[in-house]
Image (spheres, rainbow, N blue to C red):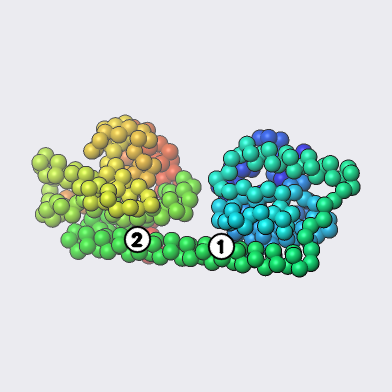
């Protein structure tokens, strides 16, 4: 069974490609960067390598050069799959390092499979004939290498700039959302504190559900302002020490739609407006404002819905004392699969004994 080494810092891409090739009869090795790849090669030499180009540490360019400069590894077919390297430089790179194929991401898996099979077959034929084509040498090789190294350096710098801009964007979003939360807190301290605690619990549940870091960030931001629509509700209603009248309750319910209207035109990279709009939907369709059922509401809203209920029951409210954590657990168990997404309830139950709002507030 041929061994294929997949090298890429994107774990999702590695896993998908590994599953695809494993299903085609290949034995798979994986590495997240050039260092891991070199160690993997030492332990078990692959028959073919598929690598990303730009990665932290030893990147694909240096990895390929390491392979080609090693007498025992030089004949291993090497395929690049990259979304960052300009097409104009690909031919020179292929010639310089004897790269067998170069694919732009997103990759057509069927074409990639054809390339894998073709290169493994060609390697087998070379091994049997003893014929090996010589690569570039001398001044020509040095010139090509110099030009390519400049291109790789440019791409690395561009990637650093892009990553820096993304980080600044995230910080600016966090600052914006924090400011909004503080503005709500200045008007209604209870709502602000409630949103902060719901955000902490939502992220904890999201981690159990194995959401990736980017999605956890969006979940945190959405939970921090999920009640932003309450800014239009009179403060005396929000802080009323007795039960609300039917008219007052209908006014409170409108905060989901108001929140959506406030947020819908902001180009967040996450479904923030939907989280505000849908966090009072219920699994059986009995919630508001749209009566969504099951997974018709986004997962983030379903997570916030449960964190919202747990926090509300566990904490003091203007019209009653805190009912406690046990009462919150009782509510979720009684309505698991009815009002609340069973998968999210189960995720909360995994941390229900260890999670503490008091401890979270200290972080």
Q: Is label 1 in a helix, a strand or a loop?
A: helix
Image coordinates of residue 133 in percent, x first then y, are 82, 52
Residue located at (71% from left, 35% from top): 25
Q: Is 244 located above or below residue 95 in the figure?
A: above
Circle 1 packing at 10 Å, graded few (<14), some (14-19), many (20+), is some
Q: Which residue is mark 1?
A: 155
- Is residue 328 at all visible to an observer of this figure? no
Closer to us: 69 or 179: 69
Image coordinates of residue 275 in percent, x first then y, are 32, 46
Q: Which residue is mark 2?
A: 173
Residue located at (36% from left, 41% from top): 298
Residue located at (11% from left, 44% from top): 248
Image coordinates of residue 153 in percent, x first then y, are 59, 66
Frontmost of labels 1 and 2 is: 1
Q: Is 154 located above or below residue 320 in the figure?
A: below
Name the quadrant containing residue 189: bottom left
Relative to 302, is 153 on the left or the right? right
- Is residue 113 at all visible to an observer of this figure? yes
């Amino acid at each position: 069974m041929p061994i294929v080494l997949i090298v890429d810092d994107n774990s999702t891409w590695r896993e998908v490609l590994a599953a695809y090739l494993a299903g085609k009869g290949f034995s798979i090795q994986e590495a997240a960067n050039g260092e891991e790849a070199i160690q993997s090669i030492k332990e078990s030499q692959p028959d073919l390598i598929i690598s990303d180009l730009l990665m932290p540490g030893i990147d694909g360019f240096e990895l390929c050069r390491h392979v080609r400069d090693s007498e025992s590894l030089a004949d291993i077919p090497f395929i690049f799959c990259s979304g960052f390297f300009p097409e104009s430089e690909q031919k020179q790179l292929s010639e310089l390092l004897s790269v067998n194929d170069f694919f732009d991401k997103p990759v057509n898996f069927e074409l990639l499979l054809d390339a894998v099979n073709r290169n493994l077959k060609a390697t087998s034929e070379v091994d049997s004939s003893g014929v090996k084509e010589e690569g570039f040498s001398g001044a020509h090789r040095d010139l090509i290498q110099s030009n390519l190294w400049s291109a790789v350096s440019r791409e690395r710098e561009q990637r650093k700039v892009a990553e820096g801009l993304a980080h600044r964007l995230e910080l600016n979003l966090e600052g914006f959302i924090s400011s909004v939360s503080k503005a709500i807190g200045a008007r209604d301290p209870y709502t602000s504190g409630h949103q902060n605690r719901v955000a902490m619990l939502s992220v904890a549940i999201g981690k159990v559900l194995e959401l990736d870091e980017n999605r956890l960030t969006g979940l945190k931001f959405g939970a921090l302002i999920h009640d932003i629509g309450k800014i239009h509700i009179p403060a005396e209603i929000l802080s009323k020490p007795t039960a609300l009248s039917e008219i007052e309750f209908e006014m409170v319910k409108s905060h989901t739609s108001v929140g959506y209207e406030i947020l819908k035109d902001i180009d967040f990279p996450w479904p923030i407006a939907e989280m505000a709009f849908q966090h009072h939907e219920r699994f059986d369709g009995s919630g508001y404002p749209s009566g969504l059922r099951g997974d018709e509401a986004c997962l983030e809203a379903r997570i916030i819905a449960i964190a919202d209920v747990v926090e509300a029951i566990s904490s003091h409210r203007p019209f009653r004392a805190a009912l406690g954590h046990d009462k919150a657990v009782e509510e979720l168990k009684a309505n698991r699969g009815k009002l609340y997404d069973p998968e999210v309830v189960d995720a909360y139950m995994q941390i229900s004994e260890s999670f503490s709002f008091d401890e979270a507030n200290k972080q």
